[in-house]
Image (cartoon, grey):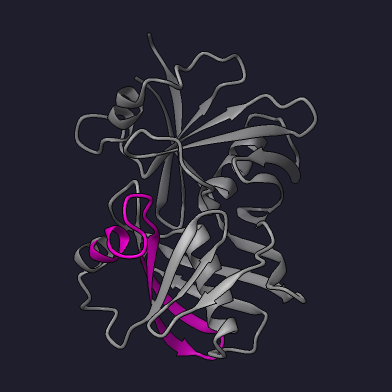
């Protein structure tokens, strides 16, 4: 069948976006999803996102990694689907939608989309790294030379190693530029490679850097390979709350396949 799709990107994290409110898409065909995300034989993307009808919220977000499997929350994907919903006329400048980790709020101001993330109640501080779940699991570690780091090799070793094993974790390598500015490079499970940006990843980095005392700020700028994101948050009694991921989200093109 002929399928209409849209391509969106948020700081280089790119997605095939499909309006599935009429349930036209076969969600069980993982090979087809992987094909659509393939950069040589398909459209090419870090993941595929379906926008679906929801009885009480504005819409539902269903996210698949590039390997074709449904995945945990994607922050940049959540920002891009909000821009997509506005393009479709479903929302104006604000939205409430359901993702795999629950309900989210989002706002749009010109091309900047702000997405409210779930509260984080637990942060694990280990000797070499910090681990926390911001809708997806994230390993966060500081590096002295981010520029020359082989992210795919180093990230893969951590992602499949102890204690993550088969379930795996996303891996974020961080360099501190200043008190409220950090550079981040991320290896994403499911993509099994470095991506230009990761929304749940930079959210995890911001909270982790605050937790271990690398910053006392509550609004952090994150420099990714694909652009600049901001994360704002409040310290809670246990963990963090009122967490917002902020940055651009753009439609790249529309097509049929």
- The quarter of the picture where the C terminus appears is top left
Asked if residue 207 lies left or right of residue 2, the reply is right
Residue 166 on the magenta span = yes
Residue 83: image quadrant is top right
Judging depth in this view, the residue of 122 and 193 nearest the camera is 122
Residue 38 spot, x, y in % from top left: 26, 35
Residue 241 spot, x, y in % from top left: 73, 67
- In this rendering, the answer to whether 151 lies above or below 126 is above
- In this rendering, the answer to whether 221 lies above or below 63 is below
Determine the residue positioned at 32% across, 29% down.
36
The mark total stands at 0
Residue 44: image quadrant is top left
Residue 105 spot, x, y in % from top left: 73, 49
Judging depth in this view, the residue of 94 and 73 nearest the camera is 73
Residue 225 on the magenta span = no
Q: Which residue extends farthest right?
A: 56
Provide the residue span drawn in magenta. Answer: 157-186
- The quarter of the picture where the N terminus appears is top left
- In this rendering, the answer to whether 78 lies above or below 203 is above
Asked if residue 245 lies left or right of residue 139, the reply is right
Determine the residue positioned at 60% across, 53% down.
111
Asked if residue 44 lies left or right of residue 14, the reply is left
Residue 19 spot, x, y in % from top left: 55, 24
């Amino acid at each position: 069948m002929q399928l209409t799709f849209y391509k969106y990107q948020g700081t280089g994290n790119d997605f095939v976006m499909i309006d599935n409110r009429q349930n036209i898409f076969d969600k069980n065909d993982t090979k087809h999803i992987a094909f659509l995300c393939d950069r040589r034989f398909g459209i090419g993307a870090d993941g595929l996102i379906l926008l679906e009808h929801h009885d009480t919220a504005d819409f539902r977000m269903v996210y698949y990694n590039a390997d074709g499997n449904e995945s945990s929350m994607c922050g940049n994907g959540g920002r891009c689907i909000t821009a997509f919903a506005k393009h479709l006329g479903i929302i104006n400048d604000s939205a409430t939608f359901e993702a795999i980790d629950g309900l989210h709020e989002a706002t749009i101001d010109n091309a900047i989309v702000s997405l409210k993330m779930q509260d984080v109640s637990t942060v694990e501080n280990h000797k070499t790294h910090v681990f926390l779940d911001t809708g997806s699991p994230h390993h966060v570690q500081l590096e002295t030379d981010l520029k020359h780091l082989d992210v795919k090799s180093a990230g893969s070793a951590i992602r499949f190693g102890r204690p993550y094993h088969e379930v795996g974790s996303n891996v974020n390598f961080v360099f501190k530029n200043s008190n409220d500015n950090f550079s981040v490079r991320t290896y994403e499970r499911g993509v099994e490679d470095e991506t230009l940006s990761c929304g749940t990843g930079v959210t995890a980095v911001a909270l982790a850097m605050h937790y271990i005392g690398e910053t006392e700020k509550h609004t952090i700028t994150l420099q990714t390979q694909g652009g600049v994101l901001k994360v704002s948050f409040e310290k809670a009694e246990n963990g963090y709350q009122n967490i917002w991921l902020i940055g651009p989200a753009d439609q790249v093109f529309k097509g049929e396949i």
